[in-house]
Amino acid sequence: MADYAIAALCFAIMTGLYLRYMAEKYRKDRNKKRELALKGGATLTAAALAGYGFAMNPTACRGMLLAGLCVCAVADVVLDLHFLAGTASFALGHLCYCTAYLLEKTPGWGSLAVFFLLCGVIAFLYPRLKRHAAPDSALPYLGYALLISAMLALALPQRPPLLAGALLFVLSDAMLLTRIVRKISSKKYNYLCLGTYFLAQFLIAASAAL
């Protein structure tokens, strides 16, 4: 019961930091440093939850999930300063997640099928991404898309919170890509996109604590 209480507390803190970050982001006199601290702090809260889980049961999988969440907390800040560097930082976080999934359960044929399916979707969308979002070089983003597809495929046989977190992470990135390509500036859309991301990180962290 204590584990669930701690998870609920972390979820409440993450939600508060996320909402405060979004409010700061849309203020006319926004404070960039405070904004970045709030954003990174939300993911660090998820990392703290995973850290609690690792302290209670120090497995290699939980250790890699904790490492991934810490890297993503840094990536949250870097992304707002330099998009490509932030993307590379998130890629490192996904490598940690992939390693955690491999340590937890061996992927089967279903994971391979999902990966190839996602590769087909990426191949279909890549020309449009290159034309509208990265005319100079879309290759780094292509590499990231393949990595996050592998992350989702490896999450397929994992426990429900891990799988749900991976799915929501991919959904959040897909929404971000859509926003960039279609130049969406809707405030509600941005709230939904980032809210999906933080929920994904919370579920990944909760899987290490519950």
Image (tube, helix red, strand yellow):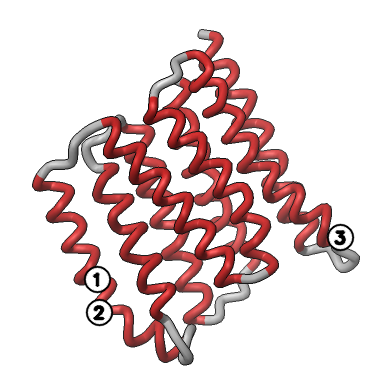
Horizontal side of residue 148 vs 50, given as left or right = left
Per the model, the C-alpha gap separating discs 1 and 3 is: 39 Å
Per the model, the C-alpha gap separating discs 2 and 3 is: 40 Å
Residue 89, horizontal then vertical, whole percent: 54, 58
Name which quarter of the figure residue 82 lies in.
bottom right
Residue 137, horizontal then vertical, whole percent: 44, 86
Q: Mark 3 points at which residue?
A: 31
Residue 164 vertical position relative to residue 122 in the rendered view, above or below: above
Q: What residue is at 77 percent from the left and 64 percent from the top?
A: 26
Q: Please report contact status of discs 1 and 2: CB closer than 8 Å, yes or no.
A: yes
Badge 2 amino acid: Phe
> Closest to the observer: 22 or 94?
94
Residue 143, horizontal then vertical, whole percent: 36, 69
Badge 3 amino acid: Asn
Q: Considering the numbered disc 3 on the image, is that residue within a helix, a strand or a loop?
A: loop
Q: Name the residue under label 2.
A: 124
> Closest to the observer: 85 or 33?
85
Badge 1 amino acid: Val
Q: Name the residue under label 1.
A: 121
Q: What residue is at 71 percent from the left and 39 percent from the top?
A: 16
Q: Please report contact status of discs 2 and 3: CB closer than 8 Å, yes or no.
A: no
